[in-house]
Image (cartoon, rainbow, N blue to C red):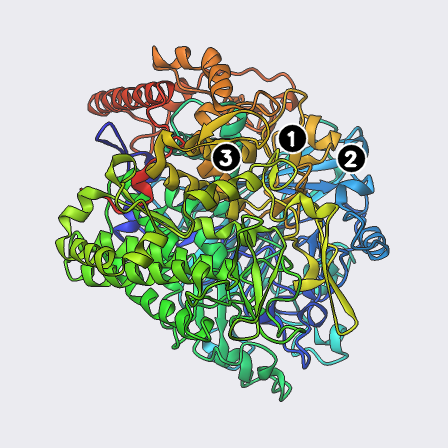
């Protein structure tokens, strides 16, 4: 429950989360867990050479059964992926049924794998009580060949050729297909689906909507007795019955759809059936055990093969085929509608009025839930961005199944894998047994977990579903994920690769966010993960500090091509690469383990000893990063002349060569920062005694690495940091220089200085070079689909923001830096952190000219009424223009924008307005502050639209849809257009009947909320929250 004014506010969605948490109702059993791409994953790769992209491609996916999962459009499944519901479409021009999203494989794309579709994740709640998905489907033939051929001709220096570039959406000849899913009030197993397809084009056009219901193939591998094979059949008219040995009996009831042709007749669905089995005859010139196979629906609908589907109307895969083609199809500006219900009830009648009312109610409950997450007033556009970021996080939850032993050794009923296959990759991860709902980095491009991505996901997830966030962090430390030696799995292409050690940070932040937002303190979670992380920390120390000098290697560390060399391979120069970022990460890891130990020590005093261990270990890492062996005239990772940290090649002893590349590698040491609160030290006498002993007996090391031991900082705090004040100021000069790191949209990953001054090295006749590349990668390192040589990445920016806020906790107003460098404007580090967050928000926010930086000047995306409010959350962003790059649904770490909007959206200036926080504040408060401080108005969000009623004689969604008011053909709005009126209509008991007691309770809740909002706005106005308008108690262990 969200806590305001020491008052717990429980929305309907929070009630469901509470019931799920307490296991009284399993609200999360069904959700948007179906992958958007299962083909070309490592799990499905049974090749001899490990070429997953070629072994199982997009074309094969139509006809070949998956072993480890399923995929689909706007898909829903249970938590083990047994039964799936998704959607297929056909426009009567495409060569095959659109059952899954299309994209290029890594070898096909000039910048690696890339989706070539137009779809948006518009809404989704943590319990998946309401979900909304938009798929833009062309009315003309989908340009598969054009996308393949044109991208094949382009080089790494060229931009990707995207679906919008093909002209397929010209003249608005496409369908806006909105897919909504809602759960019934008291039944987590009852799901309602509504598909609304708007004809945006100028002419009447046909459309076929084909909802699928099917089972994942668990019967073809020889691991399940035949009697357990599931089945789907006909129970009654328009009613499917599915039977599964785990899920039991379930029913799918399809309602006839309103007709679109001149006859006015309803569109009746044709129920069709097949088996989810491979078509061996088509793919391998083999023999099918029975004639009904996976690609039957495509062959039946598109190929007109009447014998492709099972006339007995039974199978493991079923669909309802709705044909909207009478009289040529749907008229311009009108829509086709499909409704159906999936539940454990065998009802044969669907009341469409009640059906639509329930979906509307669930949307309102979603509005209420998300409004109370961020109740402070902010621009409508920012609230829309935040809402879609949250939605994307929910749509990126997917079922992930992988059992190494079964994958490596093959299945009893299948041919054995090639002998050398199990040694190609992941041979050391024999213990892996994954069967969970995981947060994926991207719903299509990265349909597999990545450990350090997940840590960033959890910051945003903790705001709306801390239980799910904690589950993610806990899973990776459990014995069926974590290696027995303590290493956390990286990602399926190479579980043994090394990601930055951010797990402890995410664990502590998730713990603190839950406590602050929801008033719950899960010490068991914190202690359980901490104990497992002790193993992981030991693994890092033993494996990545070869000489025991507290200076670390680590490999690529998630930064792909940032270095001069491939940092995961042996150096062509010989020697060892001592990495400033790896050592910085380990300092960061140390401090986060210290933070957790101090938090636990407040409740369990034995953790004071462990806190002392991490305190001293950090001091030694900090000292080694600069002073190494303590010898005179030695070189370290810090360059006094340049005032920056660099990687260095070490050949042992004094032989070391720095690599003077100004990159994120030299900024990462800023992450290792922590303030010790004096009140906390006084509560932990054993730890305090050890700190004082170290200061007195190792004063040489302590004075070099602990800022102002004798002179405390703001609030009498002690600062632990890898950088002292002098170095901090020097690094900030680079970081805030707009000709170096400081972009209009955040901090670049490589300094723009290297645009004209690339760094190169000749080794054995080969030249290695690093230059500033602000857009897509010009290198093939790590697949070439990401770039760390100039673009902006939200994840690393987020950590920089937090570090500056920690520094502010210590230095306060005393330390002012020029921001931007050379501007003559000085501000404290709290304001600097806020300025960076504002610039990051400007990637997405609409400017005065109506454009968004991420859209790269595309008129359709910026100005078209049917596109302008929908956003893609890209993987990274052009360092000069802010253009979105890489994966398009990277709501994993790019979803952090939702947290930044929560923290600073209240005073975020518009893009291209004066850059200083005071100017931004003035601009904001002139327009916003006084309107909200004095009254209880609540800002209206662009995601909310009036409910449009329909007459009892019309069943067209156009009369009541909440999508696009411009396309509702003049139907009158009978509902109150204000947010408060809609908010007041949210069902309290599931049926909209508010008792007097509940109304009184709600009035009290609103009063507490208003008091909270007023107080927070006053705090911002007076700049009492000058630590960047975040809260220090989220970062460090604090006294109670």
Q: Secondary structure at mark 2?
A: loop
Q: Are marks 1 and 3 in contact (CB under 8 Å)?
A: no
- Disc 2 versus disc 1: distance between alpha carbons? 24 Å
Tell which of 268 and 709 is nearer to you: 709
Which mark is in front, 1 or 3? Answer: 3
Residue shown at 79% from the left, 36% from the top: 328
Query: With 99 as the anchor, is 893 left or right in this view?
Result: left
Q: Which residue is mark 1?
A: 852
Q: Secondary structure at mark 1?
A: loop
- Disc 1 versus disc 3: distance between alpha carbons? 16 Å
Percent coordinates x, y for residue 750 in the rendering: 63, 48
Percent coordinates x, y for residue 595 in the rendering: 29, 52
Assign the N terminus to one quadrant of the image.
top left
Q: Which label's residue is closer to the chain start, 2 or 3?
A: 2
Q: Secondary structure at mark 3?
A: helix
Q: Which residue is mark 2?
A: 173
Which mark is in front, 2 or 1? Answer: 1
Task: Rate crowding at label 2 as few (under 14), some (14 to 19) or many (20 or more) other CA atoms within 10 Å.
Answer: many
Task: Rate crowding at label 3 as few (under 14), some (14 to 19) or many (20 or more) other CA atoms within 10 Å.
Answer: many
Say which quarter of the image contains residue 35.
Answer: bottom right
Q: Are marks 2 and 3 in contact (CB under 8 Å)?
A: no
Percent coordinates x, y for residue 905 in the rendering: 46, 28
Residue shown at 30% from the left, 21% from the top: 1015
Q: Which residue is mark 3?
A: 837
Assign the C terminus to one quadrant of the image.
top left
Note whether 347 is above or below 171 in the view shown.
Answer: below
Q: Can residue 507 be seen here?
A: no
Query: With 746 as the anchor, is 101 left or right in this view?
Result: right
């Amino acid at each position: 429950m969200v806590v305001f004014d020491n008052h717990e506010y429980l929305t309907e969605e929070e009630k469901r989360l509470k019931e799920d948490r307490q296991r009284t109702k399993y609200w999360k059993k069904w959700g948007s867990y179906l992958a958007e791409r299962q083909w070309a994953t490592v799990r499905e790769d049974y090749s001899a050479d490990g070429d997953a992209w070629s072994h199982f491609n997009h074309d094969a996916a139509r006809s070949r059964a998956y072993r480890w999962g399923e995929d689909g459009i706007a898909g829903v499944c249970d938590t083990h992926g047994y039964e799936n519901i998704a959607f297929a479409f056909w426009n009567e021009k495409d060569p095959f049924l659109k059952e899954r999203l299309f994209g290029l494989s890594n070898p096909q794309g000039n910048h690696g794998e890339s989706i070539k579709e137009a779809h948006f994740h518009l809404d989704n709640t943590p319990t998946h009580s309401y979900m909304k998905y938009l798929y833009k489907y062309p009315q003309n033939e989908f340009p598969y060949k054009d996308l393949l051929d044109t991208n094949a001709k382009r080089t790494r220096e060229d931009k990707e050729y995207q679906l919008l570039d093909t002209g397929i959406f010209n003249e608005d000849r496409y369908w806006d297909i909105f897919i909504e899913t809602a759960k019934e009030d008291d039944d987590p197993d009852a799901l309602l689906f509504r598909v609304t397809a708007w004809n945006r084009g100028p002419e009447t056009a046909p459309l076929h909507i084909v909802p699928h219901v099917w089972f994942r193939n668990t019967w073809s591998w020889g691991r399940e007795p035949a009697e357990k094979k599931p089945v789907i059949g006909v129970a009654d008219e328009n009613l499917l019955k599915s039977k599964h040995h785990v899920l039991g009996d379930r029913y799918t009831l399809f309602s006839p759809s309103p007709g679109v042709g001149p006859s006015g007749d309803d569109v009746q669905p044709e129920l069709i059936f097949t088996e989810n089995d491979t078509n061996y005859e088509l793919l391998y010139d083999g023999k099918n055990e029975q004639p009904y196979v996976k690609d039957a629906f495509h062959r039946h609908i598109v190929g007109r093969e009447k014998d492709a589907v099972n006339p007995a109307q039974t199978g493991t895969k079923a669909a309802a085929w709705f044909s909207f083609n009478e009289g040529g199809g749907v008229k311009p500006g009108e829509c086709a509608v499909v409704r159906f219900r999936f539940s454990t009830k065998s009802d044969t009648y669907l009341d469409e009025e009640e059906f639509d009312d329930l979906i509307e109610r669930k949307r309102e409950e979603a509005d209420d839930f998300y409004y109370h997450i961020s109740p402070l007033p902010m621009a409508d556009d920012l609230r829309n961005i935040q809402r879609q970021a949250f939605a994307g996080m929910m749509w990126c939850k997917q079922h992930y199944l992988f059992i190494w032993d079964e994958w490596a050794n093959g299945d009893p009923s299948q041919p054995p894998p090639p002998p050398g296959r199990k040694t190609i990759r992941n041979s050391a991860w024999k213990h892996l047994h994954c069967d969970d709902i995981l947060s994926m980095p991207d719903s299509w491009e990265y349909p597999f977990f990545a450990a350090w991505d997940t840590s960033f996901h959890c910051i945003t997830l903790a705001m709306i579903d801390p239980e799910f966030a904690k589950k993610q962090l806990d899973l990776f430390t459990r014995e069926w994920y974590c290696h027995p030696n303590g290493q956390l799995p990286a990602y399926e292409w190479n579980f043994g690769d090394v990601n930055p050690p951010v797990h402890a940070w995410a664990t502590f932040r998730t713990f603190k966010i839950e406590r602050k937002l929801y008033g719950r303190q899960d010490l068991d979670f914190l202690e359980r993960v901490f104990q497992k992380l002790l193993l992981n920390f030991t693994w890092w120390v033993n494996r990545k500090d070869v000489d025991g000098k507290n200076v670390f290697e680590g490999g690529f560390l998630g930064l792909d091509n940032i270095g001069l060399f491939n940092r995961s391979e042996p150096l062509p120069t010989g020697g060892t690469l001592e990495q400033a970022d790896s050592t910085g990460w380990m300092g960061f890891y140390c401090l986060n383990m210290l933070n957790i130990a101090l938090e636990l020590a407040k409740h369990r005093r034995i953790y004071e000893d462990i806190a002392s261990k991490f305190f001293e270990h950090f001091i030694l890492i900090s000292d080694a990063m600069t002073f190494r062996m303590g010898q005179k005239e030695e070189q370290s990772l810090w360059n006094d002349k340049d005032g920056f940290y660099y990687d260095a090649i070490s050949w042992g002893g004094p032989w070391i060569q720095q690599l003077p590349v100004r990159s994120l590698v030299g900024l990462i040491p800023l992450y290792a920062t922590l303030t010790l609160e004096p009140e906390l030290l006084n509560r932990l006498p054993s730890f305090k005694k050890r700190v004082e002993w170290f200061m007195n007996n190792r004063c040489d090391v302590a004075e070099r690495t602990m800022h102002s031991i004798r002179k405390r900082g703001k609030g009498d705090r002690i600062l632990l940091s890898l950088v002292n004040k002098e170095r901090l100021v020097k690094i900030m000069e680079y970081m805030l220089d707009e000709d170096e790191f400081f972009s209009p949209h955040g901090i670049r990953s490589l300094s723009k200085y290297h645009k004209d001054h690339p760094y190169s090295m000749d080794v054995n006749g080969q030249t290695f070079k690093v230059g500033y590349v602000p857009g897509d990668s010009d290198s093939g390192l790590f697949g070439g689909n990401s770039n760390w040589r100039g673009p902006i990445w939200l994840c690393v920016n987020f950590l920089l923001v937090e570090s500056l806020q920690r520094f502010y906790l210590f230095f306060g107003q005393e330390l002012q830096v020029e921001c931007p460098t050379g501007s003559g404007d000085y501000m404290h580090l709290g304001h600097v952190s806020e300025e960076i967050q504002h610039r990051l928000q400007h990637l997405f926010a609409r400017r005065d000219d109506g454009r968004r930086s991420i859209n790269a000047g595309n008129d359709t995306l910026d100005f078209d009424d049917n596109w302008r409010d929908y956003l893609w959350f890209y993987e990274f962003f052009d360092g000069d223009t802010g253009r979105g790059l890489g994966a398009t649904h990277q709501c994993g770490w790019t979803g952090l924008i939702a947290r930044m909007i929560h923290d600073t959206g209240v005073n975020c200036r518009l893009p291209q307005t004066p850059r200083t926080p005071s100017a931004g504040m003035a601009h904001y408060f002139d327009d916003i502050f006084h309107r909200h401080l004095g009254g209880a108005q609540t800002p209206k969000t662009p995601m909310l639209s009036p409910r449009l009623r329909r007459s009892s004689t019309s069943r067209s969604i156009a009369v009541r849809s909440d999508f696009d008011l411009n396309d509702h053909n003049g139907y009158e709005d009978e509902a109150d257009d204000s947010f408060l009126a809609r908010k007041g209509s949210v069902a309290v008991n599931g049926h909209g009947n508010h008792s007097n007691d509940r109304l009184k309770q709600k009035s009290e809740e609103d009063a507490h909320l208003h008091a909270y909002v007023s107080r927070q706005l006053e705090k911002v106005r007076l700049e009492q929250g000058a630590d960047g308008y975040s809260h220090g108690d989220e970062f460090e262990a604090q006294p109670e």
